[in-house]
Image (cartoon, grey):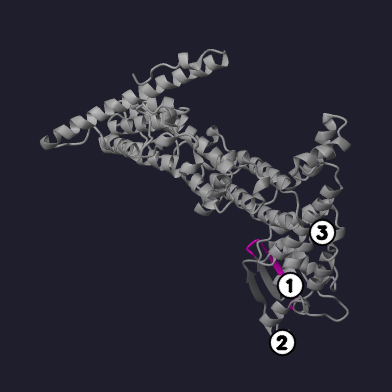
Amino acid sequence: MEACCCNLEVDVNGEETFMLDKTVITQYSSKFAKLFGKSSGGTGKLKVIFHDFPGGAEGFELMLKFCYNNGTTDISPSNLFLARSAAKYMEMKEPVPDVSNLLEQTEKSLQEISYWTWSDLLIALKQCQNLLVPDSSVMVERCLDTIVGRLVLASEASPCPSTSSTESSWIRFSCDSKSTESIKTSFSRLTWWFEDLLFLSPLLVAMLIKSMISRKMDHIVISKFLLYYQKAKFSTATTDEKSKIIEMVIDMHYDMDQSCVPCKTLFGILRVTLGLNISKCSRNKLETMIGSQLDQATLDNLLVPSPYGISYLYDVNLVLRFLKAFLRRGNGLVTPIRMRKVASLIDLYIAEIAPDPCLKTSKFLALASAIPDSARDSYDELYHAMDMYLEVHTQLSQEERLKICCGLNYEKLSPQACLHLSQNKKFPSKSAVISQQSKLKNLLHVTPSTSSYNDSPCSSSGAAQKGKKDKCSEEVVLYADNFDLSTDNEKLKAHLQGMQWRVMELEKFCRKMQIQMAKITKSKASGHSYAKSLPKLCS
């Protein structure tokens, strides 16, 4: 663009060179006025080079139109942000006689943003996204806030169910559910804008979501948009771009109400991250979110392949981090019901990974001992997992086997599991003896009216008898094949072996007594003589 007196050459970002009248430009631009001082005369030509002019040659030309048209130009949503950025850069804020300067005019136009159409807002937002200037973030926020305001009004006016409450959803559906098609139409009224905002960068999407959260927009709809955006963008994104997108998706979900983010959704995001190098911070956030809902997970969810370079089949460390996040909540937030669900899930997981020949004993034990004892009503599942692990890992030392057995609570093993354990050669003999003792205690506990048989070996009518029973229990626990007794203690060893035999005989006797008591009860019910039915148990 040329003027009558072209005494100023301006190179704009290497894109285009403009020949200008220095006098015309300096009366509107404080930046040029400071640069050239008060002198406006002289015949020599000056040259100015801009390297970072906002909007490049297009933005500079829009500013020139304002200057050469005596302070007037057509400002619309399609060029507002471009004109505003140019005006800020050129410091066009000082008043000019009879004319509002360019920055003031753009501010007045920006105040009318609430009257713009949806298309105008999208056009302005696209333009603002392309402006790499510090001030653009302020303009973007105003534009995004207006868009979110429109979406909030649309969602409030829509008869579509909120989906945040199952009960209320069905009530609302009943008001407008003549057909499945009407339900689909209602839901589409909440998601019609998804496609329109796909042009946004991850940075602007993050700003958009934060505005939505602050305006109390439905978090379920927000989550659906994030997943829609991620899926759409991944089709053309590079690996680095995918990492940035999924990090943004994770960070935004972390700021939302966790009850609105299904566990299935979080595990879906986790699967996407497996092949990407995302930041540790985002990964920790994702694992914390999953851990807080671990009681809603399934076994398939936990079967995540190990990272590259790890020998074992599944990522045990990941599950341990989930458990840590779940248990960290504590302080009444984790109810006993939720804890038992997690314990059951982890026992299933341990049983699934137990046959892995590469699974280290330390990892197996870490999983087995991570769950509090109170969370398990029964240790049968864990025992079967240990049985499988020992069957595959035959090279384990006796010490390692004993460590594994320490993870069992023998008091919570069923009689069937105790019996199996007592005959299980894969387990150390000490464990087998303890299991026999535990089984005996269970049998004595369920035997009715044992104290009535004063002549029975099961009787505990006196303190001396009780002392003998306690001593017997202590001696049985101490017995083990791997004990290295000296020759001087051979008699003691023989005594302990005899004691073990007597315990087994006692167990058989108690079983027999239970059968006889059942017969007595049956005979009494049928009218037979109680005395005739009672055998001489102690003969």
Q: Amino acid at mark 3?
A: Pro
Q: Is residue 15 magenta?
A: yes
Q: Is 201 above or below relative to 412?
A: below
Tell me: 193 left or right of 298: right
Tell me: 470 left or right of 158: left
Q: Position of residue 241 (x, y in %)?
A: 58, 48
Whether pointer 2 and pointer 1 mark residues with C-beta atoms closer than 8 Å, the reply is: no
Quarter of the N terminus within the rendering: bottom right
Q: Residues within 10 Å of mark 1 (few under 14, many from 20)?
A: many
Whether pointer 2 and pointer 3 mark residues with C-beta atoms closer than 8 Å, the reply is: no
Look at the numbered disc 3 and give the secondary structure of its residue: loop
Whether pointer 1 and pointer 3 mark residues with C-beta atoms closer than 8 Å, the reply is: no
Q: Is residue 524 magenta?
A: no
According to the image, label 2 marks what residue? 38
According to the image, label 3 marks what residue? 77
Q: Which label number is shown at residue 499? A: none
Q: Which label number is shown at residue 20? A: 1
Q: How many marks?
A: 3
Q: Residue at x 43, y 31 (%)?
A: 451
Q: Residues within 10 Å of mark 3 (few under 14, many from 20)?
A: many
State how far apart marks 2 and 3 are (Cα). Answer: 36 Å
Residue 424 visible (yes or no)? no
Highlighted magenta segment, given as a residue range? 13-22
Q: Position of residue 322 (x, y in %)?
A: 51, 45
Q: Position of residue 398 (x, y in %)?
A: 26, 35
